[in-house]
Image (cartoon, grey):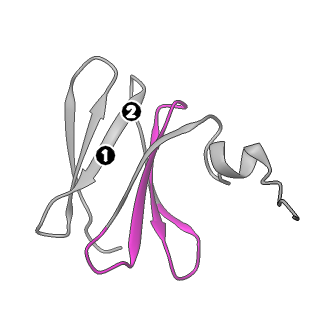
Amino acid sequence: MHTSTVRQNCLDRPLGHNDSVLAVAVTADGKRAISVSRDRTLKVWDLTSGNIVSSFKGDNIFSACAVAADGVTIVAGDSLGCLHFLRLEGV
C-alpha cells in the first residue's frame, strides 16, 4: 500500500498568509474563498486564478469567517470576540 505525504506548510500556510489558517469560507457562487489566519489577516481569493484579490489586516487574530446569504457580506470573528463586517465590492 502506497501512502502519500502532504507537506505541512501547504495546509497551514498557503501563499499569502504568514501563519496558520484558522478558517475558510467559500461564496455561494464558488468564485471566491475567504481565509483567516493567526497572522491577523483576512484574505479574499479568486478561486479561478488562485490570486488574492483583497486583504484586510486586523488588530487581533481572526478565528472564524463566513459569507452571508447575500454573497457580498463577510463576517469575521477575532480572538477578543469582536465581529467584523466587510463587503465584497468590485472583486
**Residue ID at (80%, 50%):** 7
| x, y percent for residue 36 | 44, 43
Q: Say whether residue 42 is left or right of residue 19.
A: left
Quarter of the image where the N terminus is located: bottom right
Above or below, comparing residue 12 to residue 90 in the picture: above
**Residue ID at (28%, 17%):** 80
| x, y percent for residue 57 | 44, 37
Mark 2, residues whose alpha carbon is within 10 Å: few (<14), some, or many (≥20)? many
- Taking the magenta stretch, the answer to whether it contains residue 33 is yes
Say what secondary structure mark 1 lies in.
Answer: strand
Residue closest to the far top: 80
Say what secondary structure mark 2 lies in.
Answer: strand
Q: Quadrant of residue 67?
A: bottom left
User: Residue 77 — which label?
Assistant: none
Above or below, comparing residue 18 to residue 53 in the picture: above
Q: Say whether residue 64 is left or right of residue 16.
A: left
Above or below, comparing residue 4 to residue 64 in the picture: below
Mark 1, residue position: 65
| x, y percent for residue 91 | 36, 73
Q: Mark 2 and mark 1 in contact (Cβ < 8 Å)?
A: yes
Mark 2, residue position: 62
- Taking the magenta stretch, the answer to whether it contains residue 48 is yes
Front residue of this view, candidates 30 and 90? 30
What is the span of residues highlighted in magenta in the rendered image?
27-53
**Residue ID at (59%, 36%):** 20
